[in-house]
Amino acid sequence: MDKVFIEGLTVFARHGVHPEEAVLGQRFIFDVELQLDLAPAGQSDHLTDTVDYGAVMSRITQVAEKRHCRLLESLAESIVQDLLAAFPRVTAVRLRIHKPAAPVPGTFSSLGIEVVRERSR
């Protein structure tokens, strides 16, 4: 299946289990793949036959900035469900959320989660 993808969308937001994360905030990095048939857009050359990258980035940013979630799993579920509702051509979404400054002991470049959701039929 065809995919539209965005890698490295960086959003400053306030998510986390620790109280200081809600106060101070931190960077979150999003990678998203939207599965859909790109043949109609390839044939028509019209934006209406695909998914607008800017609109996807805007929706991810809005959800990440407006919601406060303790868990990345909750944030991811909110974003994925929003994307599926907003873009009816999309049949599945794969979302990775990186938390490069997570307050956990150890040395790492990033940690996070990945979820994959398919549209209910």
Image (cartoon, rainbow, N blue to C red):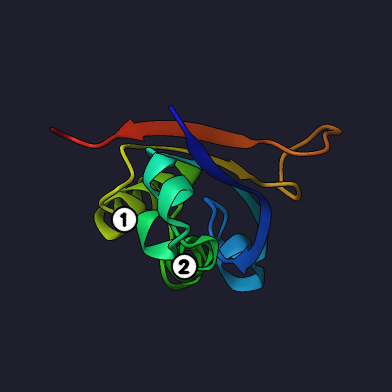
- Rendered location of residue 33, percent (x, y): 51, 40
Q: Amino acid at mark 2?
A: Ala
* Quarter-of-image position of residue 26: bottom right
Which quadrant, please, contains the C terminus? top left
Tell how many labels: 2
Which residue lies at the image location 49% right of the left edge and 63% below the top edge? 64
Judge by depth and name the residue closer to the eye, 46 or 98. 46
- The residue shown at (53%, 63%) is 57
Q: Is residue 95 left or right of residue 83?
A: right
Residue type pointed to by label 1: Phe
Q: Is residue 115 left or right of residue 82?
A: right
Q: Relative to 5, is 75 on the left or the right? A: left
The x and y percentages for residue 34 are 45, 42
Q: Which mark is residue 5?
A: none
Where disc 2 sits, the SS reads helix
Residue reaching furthest to the right: 107
Q: Is 116 above or below relative to 41?
A: above
Which residue occupies 25% across, 55% down?
Answer: 85
User: Residue 44: x and y, percent?
Assistant: 41, 55
The residue under label 1 is 87
Kindly identify which numbered label has been placed on residue 55.
2
